[in-house]
């Protein structure tokens, strides 16, 4: 299958609505200051609204990018019971953000200010998704996991996964002051990000199996956008 568009917001809008970009309202990555993107109309019918109308629990974990905080197109207004992650797709370029959103609550991470590398967003988002799956094992649910791995910026914990690839490639330091975080070994970092995503997918499948619900759930694993400058943003549907 092809993505709905070559960049984030309109591709995600097509995925959310089932409409191609000739019919969707969102046709580009239009930011809204100080945080967020151009919202969809409040009456937009989405996948989440469809599932919610059939009494499914609905959750989205990762990147939103379809309406700024306080707009008529926040995740909770678009059919999702639970949201945890980045409202703004531009801020999602940082893996050590100063805040994320849990529904309407802004979760602050002061330890990440001034280029701090303490709280890694991908791990938090993944844990929230697992908690949602485990918490709804006895009812129908729709989980949309808009993980940002792998994606610029190329930044991740230098843990055991990173160490697998640390010395396996010829590397050129990636350093653009004022842009993304400096990466001394970008090839190793991207490889490790892909492995972290694969590990997360495995943990999700294990969670379904452990709860005894792996045989009555359908899992779609698909990329939402593929561009030369952004990398791949991946969506998992349960």
Image (spheres, rainbow, N blue to C red):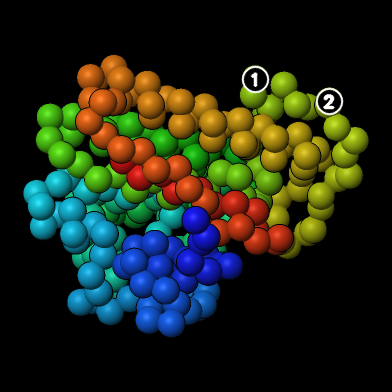
Q: Is residue 63 above or below residue 13?
A: above
Q: Residue at x 79, y 58 (%)?
A: 176
Q: Nearer the viewer, residue 38 or 48?
A: 48
Q: Secondary structure at mark 2?
A: loop
Q: Is residue 23 above or below residue 154?
A: below
In percent of width and height, residue 220 lies at 39, 43
Distance, label 2 to label 1, CA atoms, is 13 Å
The answer to which quarter of the image holds residue 32 is: bottom left
- Is 37 on the left or on the right of 117, as rendered? left
Q: Is residue 204 above or below residue 234?
A: above
In percent of width and height, residue 97 lies at 52, 50
Q: Nearer the viewer, residue 69 or 112?
A: 69
In percent of width and height, residue 148 lies at 52, 48
- Is 51 on the left or on the right of 150, as rendered? left
The answer to which quarter of the image holds residue 138 is: top left
Query: Mark 2 — residue?
Result: 167
Q: Which mark is residue 160?
A: 1
Residue 177 showing in the rendered view: yes
Disc 2 residue crowd, few under 14, some 14–19, many 20+, Cα 10 Å: few
Q: Residue at x 24, y 57 (%)?
A: 48
Q: Secondary structure at mark 1?
A: helix
Q: Residue at x 52, y 74 (%)?
A: 29
């Amino acid at each position: 299958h092809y993505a709905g568009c070559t960049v984030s917001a309109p591709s995600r809008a097509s995925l959310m609505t089932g409409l191609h970009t000739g019919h969707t309202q969102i046709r580009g990555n239009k930011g809204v200051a100080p945080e967020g993107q151009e919202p969809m109309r409040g009456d937009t019918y989405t996948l989440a609204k469809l599932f919610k109308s059939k009494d499914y629990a609905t959750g989205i974990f990762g990147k939103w990018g379809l309406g700024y905080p306080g707009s008529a197109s926040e995740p909770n207004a678009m059919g999702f019971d639970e949201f945890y992650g980045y409202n703004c797709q531009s801020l999602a370029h940082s893996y050590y953000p100063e805040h994320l959103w849990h529904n309407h609550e802004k979760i602050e991470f002061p330890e990440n200010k001034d280029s701090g590398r303490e709280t890694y967003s991908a791990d938090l988002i993944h844990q929230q998704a697992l908690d949602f799956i485990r918490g709804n094992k006895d009812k129908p649910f729709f989980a949309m996991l808009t993980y940002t791995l792998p994606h610029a910026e190329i930044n991740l914990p230098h843990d055991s996964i990173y160490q697998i690839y640390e010395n396996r490639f010829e590397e050129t330091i990636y350093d653009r002051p004022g842009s993304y975080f400096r990466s001394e070994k970008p090839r190793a970092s991207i490889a490790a990000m892909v492995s972290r995503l694969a590990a997360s997918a495995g943990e999700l499948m294990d969670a379904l199996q452990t709860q005894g619900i792996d045989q009555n759930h359908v899992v779609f694993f698909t990329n939402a956008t593929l561009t030369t400058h952004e990398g791949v943003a991946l969506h998992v549907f349960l």
